[in-house]
Image: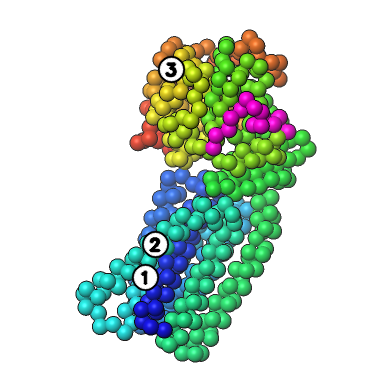
């Protein structure tokens, strides 16, 4: 093989290894979110720890540069094996032990160190046979960096759009490890056989084969591992599961009780979801409202209640995750009554903030009611949907005197987050009336009813509301009263620049 082809193939291996390295880091970040709630602190620790480990790996490999070829094979073998097993190890540890954080820290350190060792080794191999001047060394480094960054780009795009949604975390990490091992095998067979001895080459290939067999066994057993470990996290039998590009979605059922979980957080239980849904929907449907916008609420429960009112002619449902809509039309169809397939409901798959910038559907005169049923803002992505800027953008699609309701979390368990939502709506120009009800599976749960640029609306039930199981005018009037141990608070608003509400959630429950 010519020198040019030798180096081209080695650079291709660099790109493949870089892609695998970035996928491992993204897998760790995804696991942190799914298993531990993620957040700014966890994300920062993983990224900072990974970068620090890169530097440690580069220093640690210096004594082995004299044997760069065999060391490179050893590093790639370990990286493929550890990276490929990392997701399974952490998932199992979290399910059986209850705390997989130490696996996360250890995995970040080990994978970062091995990835950091790659560049010095590859630089040494690329320089083989050269009399390197400054310009020559610069060209080699430029080629190496270009291949490395290109591979990182490929890995960064592959994880959310291909690996995670198609393979899931455990199988995806294992397949990535196989690619890492394959790259090392190609380098061994085609590039390094003239550098290392036949005996060393045979030993290297044997080790690579053993590692590949281990990961193959993991891939074959991954469904059983995931089913067993996942079920341990839930008290009731799992009837549906999907790892989407955005979150882990689980549906459980025991008897007549069906429950939806997103990233481990309970979204509703059919034992009492009617309390939450009636409290969310009916106070926001003012007299004469005909066009309603739902942001979030992909389970279809809010749409179900709106469809019980014949005067509601148009419902626009904006949901980010198509997998949630798929489950709403499948295992959750009996719960929502097939609401999302009703001709009055138009489902739009989009991010709520992105859609509000350029709404694709807007009734003449705007929406009469807006129901915001989004997950709690426990990370920056969700935090921006509870910001002054988000609520300001909402005014673009409102009809005059339109009512807006926001699910605002628990005023007892997370009081700062609840009152922060109320204050943020006020800072965006809305007059707000908070209210709260008791939902047994959630506890004390709160909402914010708002109207833009007017006096605060008084929560009432529309005269044409259907027969309800929980909400009555008397219950709704009582819901606006807050006891002394949970008195209203005026807090600085949450903004895109300073998402204070995310920190409120990170502080945990009272």
- Going from N to C along the chain, the mark reached first, 3 or 1, is 1
Label 3 CA crowd tier, 10 Å (few <14, some 14–19, many 20+): many
User: Residue at label 1?
Assistant: 119
- Going from N to C along the chain, the mark reached first, 3 or 2, is 2
Tell me where residue 345 appears, x and y as whole percent: 61, 28
User: Residue at label 2?
Assistant: 150
Label 2 CA crowd tier, 10 Å (few <14, some 14–19, many 20+): some
Label 1 CA crowd tier, 10 Å (few <14, some 14–19, many 20+): many
Q: Can residue 407 be seen from the camera position used here? A: no
User: Residue at label 3?
Assistant: 452
Query: What segment is highlighted magenta in the picture?
Result: 334-349
Asked if labels 2 and 1 touch by Cβ distance under 8 angstroms, the answer is no
- For label 1, the SS is helix
**Residue found 51% across the figure and 82% down from its top:** 204
As drawn, the residue found furthest toward the top would be 463
- For residue 105, the mark is none
Q: Can residue 254 be seen from the camera position used here? A: yes
Give left or right: position of 336 versus 55: right
**Residue found 27% across the figure and 71% down from its top:** 139
- Going from N to C along the chain, the mark reached first, 1 or 2, is 1
Which quadrant of the figure has residue 427? Answer: top left
Q: How many marks?
A: 3
Residue 124 lies in the magenta stretch? no
Rounded to the nearest angstrom, the CA distance separating label 1 from label 2 is 14 Å
């Amino acid at each position: 093989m010519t020198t040019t082809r030798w180096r081209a193939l080695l650079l291709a291996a660099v790109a493949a290894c870089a892609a695998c390295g970035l996928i491992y880091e993204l897998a760790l970040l995804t696991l942190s979110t799914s298993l531990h709630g993620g957040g700014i602190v966890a994300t920062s620790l993983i990224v900072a720890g990974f970068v620090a480990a890169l530097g440690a790996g580069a220093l640690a490999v210096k004594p082995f540069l004299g044997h760069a070829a065999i060391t490179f094979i050893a590093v790639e073998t370990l990286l493929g094996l550890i990276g490929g097993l990392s997701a399974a190890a952490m998932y199992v540890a979290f399910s059986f032990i209850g705390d997989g954080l130490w696996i996360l820290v250890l995995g970040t350190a080990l994978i970062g160190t091995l990835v950091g060792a790659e560049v010095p080794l590859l630089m040494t191999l690329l320089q083989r046979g050269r009399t390197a001047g400054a310009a020559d060394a610069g060209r080699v480094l430029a080629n190496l960096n270009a291949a490395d960054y290109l591979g990182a780009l490929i890995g960064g795009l592959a994880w959310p759009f291909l690996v995670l949604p198609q393979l899931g975390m455990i199988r995806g990490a294992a397949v990535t490890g196989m690619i890492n091992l394959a790259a090392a095998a190609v380098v061994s067979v085609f590039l390094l056989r003239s550098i290392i001895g036949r005996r060393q080459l045979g030993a290297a290939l044997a080790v690579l084969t053993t590692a590949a067999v281990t990961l193959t066994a993991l891939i074959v057993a991954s469904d059983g591992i995931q089913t067993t470990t996942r079920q341990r996290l839930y008290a009731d039998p799992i009837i549906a599961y999907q790892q989407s590009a955005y979150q882990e979605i689980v549906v459980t059922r025991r008897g007549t009780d069906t429950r939806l979980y997103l990233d481990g957080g309970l979204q509703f239980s059919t034992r009492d979801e009617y309390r939450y849904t009636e409290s969310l929907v009916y106070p926001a449907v003012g007299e004469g409202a005909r066009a309603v916008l739902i942001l979030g609420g992909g389970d279809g429960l809010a749409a179900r209640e709106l469809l019980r009112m014949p005067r509601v002619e148009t419902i626009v449902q904006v949901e980010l995750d198509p997998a949630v809509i798929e489950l709403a039309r499948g295992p959750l169809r009996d719960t929502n009554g097939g609401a999302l397939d009703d001709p009055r409901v138009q489902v739009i798959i989009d991010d709520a903030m992105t859609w509000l910038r350029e709404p694709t559907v807007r009734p003449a005169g705007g929406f009469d009611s807006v129901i915001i049923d989004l997950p709690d803002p426990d990370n920056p992505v969700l935090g921006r949907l509870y910001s002054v800027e988000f609520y300001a953008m909402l005014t673009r699609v409102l009809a005059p005197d339109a009512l807006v309701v926001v699910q605002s979390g628990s005023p007892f368990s997370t009081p700062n987050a609840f009152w922060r939502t109320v204050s943020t709506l006020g800072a965006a120009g809305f007059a707000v009336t908070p209210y709260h009800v008791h939902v047994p599976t959630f506890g004390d749960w709160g909402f914010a009813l708002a109207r833009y640029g007017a006096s605060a609306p008084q929560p009432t039930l529309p005269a044409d509301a259907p027969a309800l199981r929980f909400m009555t005018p008397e219950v709704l009037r009582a819901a606006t009263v807050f006891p002394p141990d949970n008195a209203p608070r005026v807090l600085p608003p949450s903004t895109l620049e300073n998402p204070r509400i995310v920190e409120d959630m990170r502080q945990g429950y009272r």
